[in-house]
Image: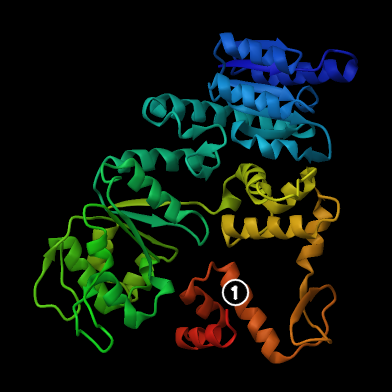
Amino acid sequence: MRYLLGLIGKNNKDEIQFHSCLKALLKASASEITEAHSASSVLSYLAIDDYDAIWIRWPLLKNLYTNFCHRLEVINKKVPLIIMYNDKQISGEICLGNNMVFSLIHEKQLKETVPILINRIHQFNQFKKINDHHQKKDIRPNGYRKFVGNDESMLKLYSQIIKVAKTDFSVLILGQSGSGKEIVAKSIHRLSHRNKSPFISLNYAAIPENLLESELFGYEKGAFTGAQKAKEGKFELANNGTIFLDEIGDLALPLQGKLLRVLEDHTIERLGGTTTKKVDIRLLAATNKDLNQLTEEGKFRADLFHRLNVIPIKLLPIRERGDDITLLVLHLIASLTKNAELKIKSISYELIEKLKSFPLNGNVRELENILTRLIFYSETLDLSEDDLDEISTIDVVENESSDTVDLKINPKIVPLRDVEKQAISDALNKLDRHITNVADALEISRGTLYNKIKEYNL
């Protein structure tokens, strides 16, 4: 591989030692190493030659970063950019040009990080080489399309999306809540030959069971009380396009049989109807449950499972995606502050390391929620691990002057009704309003949960 290094001039022993260490680590995988000693020199070299990665020290980019990234994108070679820094705080500037960032390395961890990065750079460049002709505009050093991440598992995911999009195979997307299952489905649709036709999405967990059949299959006029005119169901609306059935594991057994019929003979029958209609759809389904286990327990039809599980695609939780959390933090902060007056000054390296050890069961959505709170509660807009400790202690207390609930530190005793409301609200947010999972976590029935949501106006 050919590397372009942006290094500070050799002014002292520390600089000489750092340069020697970096080049020694890169030497085994490098066919050529080119040195530059300013941001403009790096861009000049890149404009006239091809490199597999740029390794650059942050002091060369400080106060020049935004312009550097703009020019880098104009050159448009999408070369992985690895920024090396030695401060406790990462500049908030990096959030503004995060698309070009492949990785951030703290110089103290050079020896541990560089060998891992070399392998990732090779994998990314292979992925880019294979797919660049058709996917050029979608591939970025920090991810692909709407995805952020260049971990090995994500590069594999991107390849699977591109490959399966060229077919009409049924796909079962597996992953935890908030891991991006719907983004996978939308990407498959938009890369497929059906992209000019509708993409229809349905989340079983968000719809009461008694309404699901009419949502899926539609109904004829007079099919039930209140059916004053006929209505098309999701399958008809998705004709010639793609239908995405989210949380398929929550589908009741009677409807599983009807879904199987759609997959086998491509026909549907509206509720209250007497005739069948042909539909031409591509089915994508998703779940965060173990369908194998549900099948063994008799809660999910084995024949339907085999029909759905033609091409399984699995998304890993973000805590298992290595350094992707760093890239996600940069991306989410940029997104959260894009249209706000709040501009993050810096982000603590220790904060990002701490986030890597968080359970983050809600994955990207939970990470976004945490970062939103960090930004809101930070007084200096220099985000640190101390801010994370502070928002972790926030709880619900009674506001003595009103009937509302305030968020403060050191909670007092509160009425049981307020505790219940907050518990349900927290569970809904943490579990992405997945009704079945929320009900299970709170150990109440779905019906009780629906009533509580209505009662508390949640």
What's the image's color scheme?
rainbow
Residue toward you, 360 or 416: 416
Residue toward you, 317 or 198: 198
Q: Amino acid at mark 1?
A: Ala
Residue toward you, 48 or 80: 48
Work out whether residue 350 can be spotted.
yes
At x 18%, y 65%, the residue is 262
Q: Which residue is mark 1?
A: 427
- Does 441 appear above or below 184? below
Work out whether residue 298 can be spotted.
no
Quadrant where the C terminus sits is bottom right
At x 54%, y 54%, the residue is 317
- Does 95 appear above or below 127? below
Quadrant where the N terminus sits is top right
| Number of numbered discs visible in the structure rendering | 1
Which secondary structure, mark 1?
helix
